[in-house]
Image (cartoon, coloured by chain):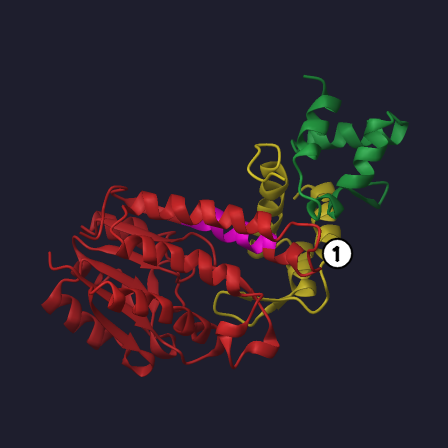
Chain colours: A green, B yellow, C red
C-alpha cells in the first residue's frame, strides 16, 4: 500500500478531537493530523515532507 | 534521545491546558510544565513520557483507536 | 483456600484518599454479592495487621491500595506492609495492587514465592485530577475514567473472572474511555486524560497464572 493510502486509512479512523493533536514538527512548526491531511491529500511538497517523517516515525 | 521526537513530544504537551494536574505516584502532582521539564532533562520519567507518547501515536496505526 | 478477600486503603494524603474513596464501590459490590471480606482502612493499614490477617485467614484475593516502589507496597504513612520479606505469606493468593512500579520486581518475585497471580503496574499508576475537588474525589470528573479503569479490575476479579480476563476487560474499557474522551465535544483537558489513560493501560501487568480466579 502506498504511504499516502496508509496515512489516509489511519486518518479516516481518527476521532474528531484526536485530529486536532500535533502529530509531527516540520521546520519547528507543529503540524496537526488535520493539517497533515490537507497537505498530503493535495500532494504538496510540504505534504510529501510530512508523510516522509510520519513513515520514518512509524506513525503510519 | 532523538531530538526530533523530543521536540514533537514537548509541543504535544504544550498544547495541554496549563492548569492540568496529574497525580503521578508518590511525589507531588505534576503539571503540564513539570512533564515538559522532565522531557527536556531526559531523566527517567522524561524518557518514559517520550516512549509512551510515541507508543500512543503509533497505536492509531494499529487500529486500536477508531471513530 | 477460603473465599475471602482482603482490601487495604490508607488515606493519609490526598492521592491515596482518592483510592480510598474509589474503593467504596468495591466494598459495596462485595457486600451486595455476599463475599466475605476484610477491609483495613486509614491508620489500620500497618504491616502487623496485614501480616496477622494474611497468616490466619489466607485470603484468596488481596487488593492493596496505596503508594509503592519496585519491591514494596505501602500502607498508612507510606510505611511498607508488603515487601520481599513477607510476600510469601500471600502464597496461593491473587494480588491486585495500584502501588506504583510494584510489578517491576515485586510482582515477579511474588510469583516465584508462590503467589498465584500478581496484577500491578510497571510504571506509576497516574490519573488526572481537579485540585478543586480534592475534598470530594468521587465528584472529580477528571479522575472518573481512572476510577472506572482500576475498579473494573477489582470488580471483574470479585465476579470470579480470571486474572487475564480481568486485565483484558480493563484494557478494553480503557480503550473505550479513550474513544469517549475523543469526540467532537471534547474539553481541552481530554488530551491529557486520553494520554494518561493510555499510560495506565500500557503499564498494567500480570505475572503468574493468567487463569487464576477468585473462586
- Left or right: C83 as drawn, with respect to C123: left
The magenta stretch spans which residues?
Answer: C194-204
Q: Looking at the rendering, which quadrant does residue C56 occupy?
A: bottom left
- A10 falls in the magenta region: no
Q: Which residue is drawn at 17% across and 51% down?
A: C215
Q: Quadrant of the N terminus of chain C?
A: bottom left
Residue A4's place in the image compared with C177, above or below, is: above
Q: Residue at x 45, y 46 (%)?
A: C171
Q: Which residue lies furthest to the right in this view?
A: A45
Q: Position of residue A12 (x, y in %)?
A: 69, 33
Pinpoint residue C11: horizontal percent, then vertical percent: 40, 78
Q: Residues within 10 Å of mark 1 (few under 14, many from 20)?
A: some
Instruction: Decide whether the magenta segment is chiefly helix, strand or loop.
Output: helix
Q: Nearer the viewer, residue A43 or B55?
A: A43
- Say left or right for C113 vs C183: left
Q: Position of residue C71 (x, y in %)?
A: 34, 59
Q: Is residue C190 above or below residue C56?
A: above
Q: Is C197 in the magenta?
A: yes
User: Farthest top residue?
Assistant: A1
Residue that carries the numbered disc 1 in the rendered image: B15
Q: Depth check: C2 or B27 in front?
A: C2
**Does dot 1 land on a helix, a strand or a loop?**
loop
Mark 1 belongs to chain: B
Q: Looking at the picture, does residue A23 appear above or below residue A57? A: below
Q: State whether residue C5 appears in this view.
A: yes
Amino acid at each position: 500500500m502506498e504511504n499516502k493510502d496508509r496515512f489516509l486509512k489511519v486518518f479516516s479512523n481518527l476521532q474528531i478531537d484526536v485530529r486536532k493533536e500535533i502529530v509531527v514538527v516540520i521546520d519547528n512548526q507543529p503540524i496537526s493530523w488535520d493539517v497533515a491531511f490537507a497537505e498530503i491529500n493535495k500532494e504538496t511538497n510540504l505534504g510529501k515532507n510530512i508523510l516522509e517523517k510520519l513513515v520514518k516515525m512509524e506513525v503510519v | 534521545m532523538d531530538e526530533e521526537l523530543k521536540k514533537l513530544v514537548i509541543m504535544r504537551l504544550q498544547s495541554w491546558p496549563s492548569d492540568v494536574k496529574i497525580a503521578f505516584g508518590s511525589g507531588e502532582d505534576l503539571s503540564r510544565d513539570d512533564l515538559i521539564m522532565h522531557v527536556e532533562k531526559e531523566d527517567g520519567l522524561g524518557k518514559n513520557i517520550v516512549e509512551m507518547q510515541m507508543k500512543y501515536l503509533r497505536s492509531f496505526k494499529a487500529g486500536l483507536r477508531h471513530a | 483456600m477460603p473465599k475471602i478477600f482482603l482490601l487495604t486503603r490508607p488515606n493519609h494524603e490526598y492521592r491515596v484518599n482518592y483510592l480510598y474513596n474509589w474503593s467504596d464501590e468495591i466494598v459495596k459490590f462485595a457486600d451486595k454479592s455476599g463475599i466475605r471480606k476484610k477491609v483495613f482502612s486509614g491508620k489500620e493499614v500497618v504491616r502487623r495487621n496485614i501480616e496477622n490477617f494474611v497468616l490466619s485467614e489466607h485470603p484468596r484475593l488481596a487488593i492493596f491500595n496505596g503508594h509503592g516502589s519496585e519491591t514494596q507496597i505501602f500502607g498508612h504513612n507510606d510505611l511498607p506492609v508488603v515487601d520481599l520479606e513477607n510476600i510469601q505469606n500471600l502464597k496461593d493468593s491473587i494480588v491486585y495492587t495500584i502501588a506504583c512500579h510494584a510489578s517491576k520486581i515485586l510482582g515477579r518475585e511474588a510469583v516465584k514465592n508462590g503467589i498465584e497471580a500478581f496484577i500491578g503496574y510497571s510504571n506509576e499508576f497516574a490519573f488526572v485530577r481537579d485540585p478543586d475537588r480534592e475534598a470530594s474525589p468521587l465528584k472529580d470528573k477528571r479522575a472518573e475514567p481512572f476510577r472506572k479503569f482500576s475498579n473494573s479490575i477489582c470488580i471483574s476479579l470479585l465476579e470470579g473472572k480470571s486474572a487475564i480476563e480481568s486485565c483484558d476487560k480493563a484494557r478494553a474499557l480503557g480503550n473505550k474511555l479513550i474513544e469517549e474522551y475523543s469526540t467532537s465535544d471534547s474539553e481541552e483537558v481530554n488530551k491529557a486524560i486520553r494520554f494518561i489513560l493510555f499510560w495506565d493501560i500500557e503499564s498494567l501487568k500480570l505475572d503468574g497464572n493468567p487463569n487464576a480466579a477468585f473462586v
